[in-house]
């Protein structure tokens, strides 16, 4: 199996962009209903104008997030060749990583509630090296800024960060197929002393 496999063979589905903001849209709808029914009764027209203004700000934020998610999807590329899992990501800050199969420790398919609704899944991998430089365990970096504890983050990761890799938005069957391919490559390419995973 020396064929190079890319996102053209197993693409990140376009519906993933919408799935990634579904939680935001639900929160927006619930907030809008709450504001309309409970706050407008007390304030009349002035309260309704305030609700519409706040709702407009939420909608602008949602549109910006859709654009950001689409850009993340379109700038993320992966390929599986005979020796390496190759990843490329970044909207403004382009990054590449070539990971030898011998350093990959965990390969699993994840599905959250919205993934199940849309028939999607994420292929997640962890390798033996941190690959995060001076970044401390439990901290996330986005656009070069340390943001805080990863456990507090709710956004789905795309690409790689530290020793974690995620290929989200795959059809469930495609995620399982890719998992099998990566596991086979791990058997064919055991770890060597010279491989670092960076």
Image (cartoon, grey):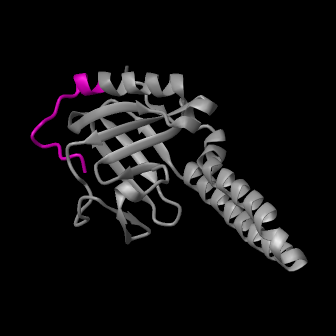
The residue sitting at the front extreme is 42
Compared with 8, 36 (above or below) is: below
Residue 191 in magenta stretch:
yes
Residue 88 x/y as whole percent: 44, 50
Viewer-nearest residue: 26 or 62: 26
**Which residue is located at x 45 percent, y 61 percent?**
94
Residue 43 x/y as whole percent: 83, 77
Magenta segment's dominant SS is loop
Residue 2 in magenta stretch:
no
- What number of labels is visible? 0
**Which residue is located at x 75 percent, y 60 percent?**
32
Viewer-nearest residue: 132 or 94: 132
Q: Quadrant of the rendered structure where residue 176 is?
A: top left
Residue 133 x/y as whole percent: 23, 63
**Which residue is located at x 68 percent, y 60 percent?**
62
Q: What residue range appears in magenta? A: 185-198
Q: Is residue 57 left or right of residue 164?
A: right
The residue sitting at the left extreme is 193
- Can the viewer see residue 70? yes
Query: Where does the N terminus fall, quadrant-wise?
Result: top left
Residue 157 x/y as whole percent: 45, 50
Compared with 22, 5 (above or below) is: above
The residue sitting at the bottom extreme is 46
Compared with 131, 81 (above or below) is: above
**Which residue is located at x 37 percent, y 44 percent?**
165
- Can the viewer see residue 11? no
Q: Quadrant of the rendered structure where residue 27 is?
A: bottom right
Q: Is residue 8 left or right of residue 136?
A: right
């Amino acid at each position: 199996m020396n064929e190079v496999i890319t996102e053209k063979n197993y693409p990140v589905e376009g519906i993933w962009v919408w799935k990634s903001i579904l939680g935001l849209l639900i929160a927006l709808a619930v907030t809008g209903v709450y504001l309309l029914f409970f706050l407008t009764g007390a304030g009349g027209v002035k309260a309704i104008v305030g609700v519409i203004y706040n709702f407009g700000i939420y909608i602008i934020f949602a549109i910006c997030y859709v654009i950001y998610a689409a850009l993340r999807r379109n700038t993320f590329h992966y390929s599986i060749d005979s020796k390496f899992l190759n990843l490329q990501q970044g909207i403004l800050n382009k990054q590449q990583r070539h990971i030898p199969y011998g350093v990959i420790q965990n390969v699993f398919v994840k599905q959250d509630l919205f993934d199940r609704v849309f028939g999607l899944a994420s292929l997640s991998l962890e390798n033996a090296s941190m690959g995060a430089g001076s970044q401390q365990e439990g901290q996330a970096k986005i656009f070069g800024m340390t943001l805080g504890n990863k456990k507090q983050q709710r956004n789905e990761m795309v690409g790689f960060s530290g020793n974690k890799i995620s290929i989200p938005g795959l059809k469930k069957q495609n995620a399982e197929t890719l998992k099998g391919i990566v596991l086979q490559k791990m058997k064919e390419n055991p770890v060597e002393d010279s491989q670092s995973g960076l």
